Image (tube, rainbow, N blue to C red):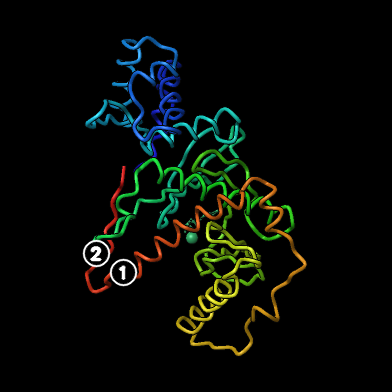
Amino acid sequence: MKLDAKVLRYMSSEEFRVLTAVEMGSKNHEIVPTPLIAQIAGLRHGGSHKILGELAKKNLISRVKNAEYDGYRLTYGGYDYLSLKTFVKRSSIYSVGNQIGVGKEADIYIVADENENQHVLKIHRLGRISFRAIKSKRDYLQKRKSASWMYMSRLASIKEFSFMKILHENGFPVPKPIDNSRHCLVMEFIDAYPLLAQCGLIHGDFNEFNILVKENGDPILIDFPQMVSISHPNAEWYFNRDVECIRTFFRRKYNYESMLYPKFKLDVNREFDLDVQVTASGFTKQYQKELETYQNEICKSLDNYDSDDSMVKMSFVV
Ligand code: ADP
Ligand code: MG
């Protein structure tokens, strides 16, 4: 899924109304019936018909005919469009530049505001990876509908933004969060190279790619969708996994093995109530539960993945 910022410039207000109507209809309908779209958009059935065709041609929505009715669903392209439009309206973004990173389930772009300050746009794309070698027929990852992938991407983005905000407000070395809409967030651009540092929180995906070091040596942490509270029932497990990740990095890369490394019971600083602050800021316990269920599903299918069976196949669900 390529981000197409060009399309932003060529959209009529009626097209935007219809696209918004499809998004609103998606809240209750996996495939939004055509008459409902017309009704939400406040356009005659005939009027919205042509516009729906145009939007489908631009790949912002796609037509789905099922046994019961004709309708449309939002694509990731359409979802990107709506987020970008929101960012532009709030002056968080003025232009979109190069892609600087492709993660497992996210795309990273350089963007700029009106004053040409450079920022980073992170677009969460959960469900992008499908594993060819998933053996279990019971696996329901494949069956998950695109609408709920988008929902999960939105949760991941809300989570990352909420954590970044709280961490930043509490003086932790993380990028400054700027804006969040749907599955996208805008944050400070860190002009640095990936390396390594240490911090006492449970990051959940603590590796050399998620710790950037500025030229002056200051470490900056990024990438928080796996972050958990220290009162999480599996906190110690997550903590040990993060520590192990960094120890492995030093062992492999520098043949260095220290007996001095953080231990959960001794070193976790329980003075902080960051988890409580995050919940208060909008990333609720319910969201955490839903996202965690998804992340566990991914883990399970990774466990089932047969590593002998060549490469992981990347494919776009939408
Ligand atoms: P993923 O969840 O896909 O791993 P990340 O948030 O770690 O996504 O971003 C992927 C890569 O993009 C990072 O390893 C880093 O090189 C780059 N990147 C992400 N955020 C920033 C930022 N704020 N400033 C500079 N580079 C960044
Ligand atoms: Mg990362």
> How far across and down, in percent of the image, does residue 83 sit?
49, 35
Q: Is residue 314 above or below residue 249?
A: above
Closer to the chain start, of discs 2 and 1, is 2
Q: Residue 304 bears which disc, if any? A: 1
Which disc, if any, is residue 56? none
Q: Are marks 2 and 1 in contact (CB under 8 Å)?
A: yes
Image quarter of the C terminus: top left
Amino acid carrying label 1: it is: Asn
Q: Is residue 70 visible?
A: yes
Q: Position of residue 149 (x, y in %)?
A: 40, 46
Does residue 56 lie above or below 205 as drawn?
above
Residue drawn at x 55%, y 35% as measured from the top left: 93
Residue 139: % across, % down? 30, 59
Describe residue 63's horizontal placement relative to residue 164 as left or right: left
Q: Residue at x 74, y 57 (%)?
A: 170
Residue that mark 2 sits on:
133
- Vertical placement of residue 247 versus 97, above or below: below
Q: Name the secondary structure under disc 1.
A: helix
Q: Give left or right: position of 9 versus 145.
A: right
Secondary structure under the numbered disc 2 in the rendered image: loop
Give the x, y percent position of residue 241: 52, 75
On the rendered image, what quadrant is the N terminus found in? Answer: top left
Q: How far apart, in angstroms, are the residues tagged by discs 2 and 1?
A: 8 Å
The yes-or-no answer for disc 2 within 8 Å of ligand 1 is: no
Q: Is residue 46 left or right of residue 114?
A: left
Is 213 in front, or is 12?
A: 12
